[in-house]
Amino acid sequence: MATLRERFLGSILGCAVGDALGAPFEGSSSSAVRSRWGRHVRFHPIPGYPLGQYTDDTQLTLAMMRSICRMQRVDGADIANEFIRLWQTDEIVGAGASCTDAVYAMMDNGKSWEEAGTAEGRAGNGSAMRAAPVGLWNYAHPELIEQDAVTSSIITHRDSRSIAGAIAVAKAVQLCVNADRLDPPAFIEEVSHAVRKTSEPFARWISQLSQLLGTGPSEALPHIYGAGNPDFGPRQPGWITAYVVPTVLGALYFFLRTPHDFIESITEAIGAGGDTDTIGAITGAISGAFNGTSSVPAALIADLKDSSNIIALTEQFYRVAASRQPR
Ligand SMILES: [Mg+2]
């Protein structure tokens, strides 16, 4: 069984590897992604960047960890400052519109971190994609996940569905980091229960995963693509959009289909097409938390940009979290 430290490393390296594997395919259809996967899972190039480049999903996750290490709590104002620095230094890669709008609202228009995030009506996946540290930090304090996920989400995303997505990802990671065995229906109900107060519809969509798990991707994906999206009606978009509901449902589905196989989960998740870096990052963070760092291929960790810095920060984050919460 993976140790707690190995699960912290698995979650954050899983997020970064999933993000970097998915990033070159962002915006591609499922069939286009699948036709470009070779027999071996490896990083594909993104023009203008080194091989193994990760994007905003990982950058904002690492920013959350730096802040939590420093503040020893989830502090909205301090996390916001970490985010702003990534835009000021032009380091941010592939930023989403909601995050960029919120950062400029704080930077240029003097908005506070509590009011800068996009309002109800625009439910992107940009706060769910960086929620793994909330679950890790609260691995022994599940009662604090909701409030910390809300704090970390509203900096950029104030829509109740986006907040619920962040809670769901944090809760899934917290369950995984503590679990030696997995009972998918019970797991789904716990994640659904965690978001119910914030978004009853989101809780219902998560509960429906129990039925979808009995079907393969060709049958399940049309339901996931269109989940909770009134804009598409009976049609469905044909890939994972940046809307938080399909992104989080897809990540949970592909993790729970093959819970013991990190690579199978993230390659199938990225193969769903669309917002491939984000679904790769979230699926990787959840699967890595369950399976530990040994489940992430060493060759991918070696080829991941900045992997030694990511490992060092995660080790520090683990020590701070473990000393806060002795077992
Ligand atoms: Mg990204």
Image: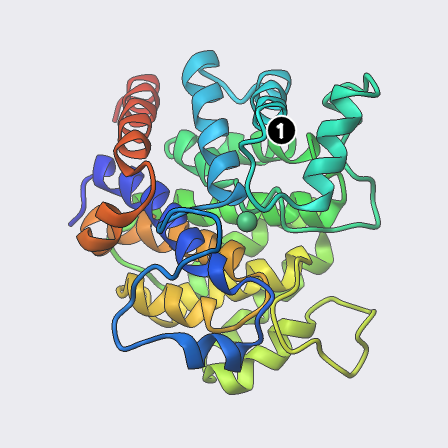
Apparent side of residue 220 relative to residue 269 in the rendered image (left or right): right
Which of the pair 160/94 is nearer the observer? 94
Residue 105 % position (x, y): 79, 27
Q: Is residue 314 left or right of residue 29?
A: left
Callout 1, which amino acid?
Trp
**In the rendered view, would you say 299 is above or below 263?**
above
**Residue in the image at 26% along x and 53% along y:** 300
- Pick the front one: 42 or 81: 42
In this view, 103 is above or below 17:
above
Residue at 46% from the left image edge and 56% from the top image edge: 46
Residue drawn 75% across and 22% down? 106
Q: Is mark 1 within 8 Å of ligand 1?
A: no
Q: SS of the residue at dot 1?
A: helix
Query: Which of the image's four quarters has the C terminus?
Result: top left
State how the image is colored.
rainbow
Question: Dot 1, how many residues are within 10 Å of its Cα: few (below 14), some (14-19), or many (20+)?
Answer: some
- In the image, 247 versus 108, the foreground residue is 108
Outermost residue on the top side: it is: 71
Q: Position of residue 4 (x, y in %)?
A: 24, 37
Seen as rendered, the residue at the extreme left is: 1
Instruction: Please state the horizontal and vertical placement of residue 19, each as a whole percent of the image.
Output: 44, 52
**Total numbered badges shown on the rendered structure:** 1
**Rendered view: 169 above or below 254:** above
At horizontal 41% and vertical 52% (from top left) the residue drawn is 20
| Residue 65, position as x, y percentages in the image | 44, 27
The residue beneath circle 1 is 87
Let me know if residue 197 appears in the view.
Answer: no
Residue 210 visible in the shown view: yes
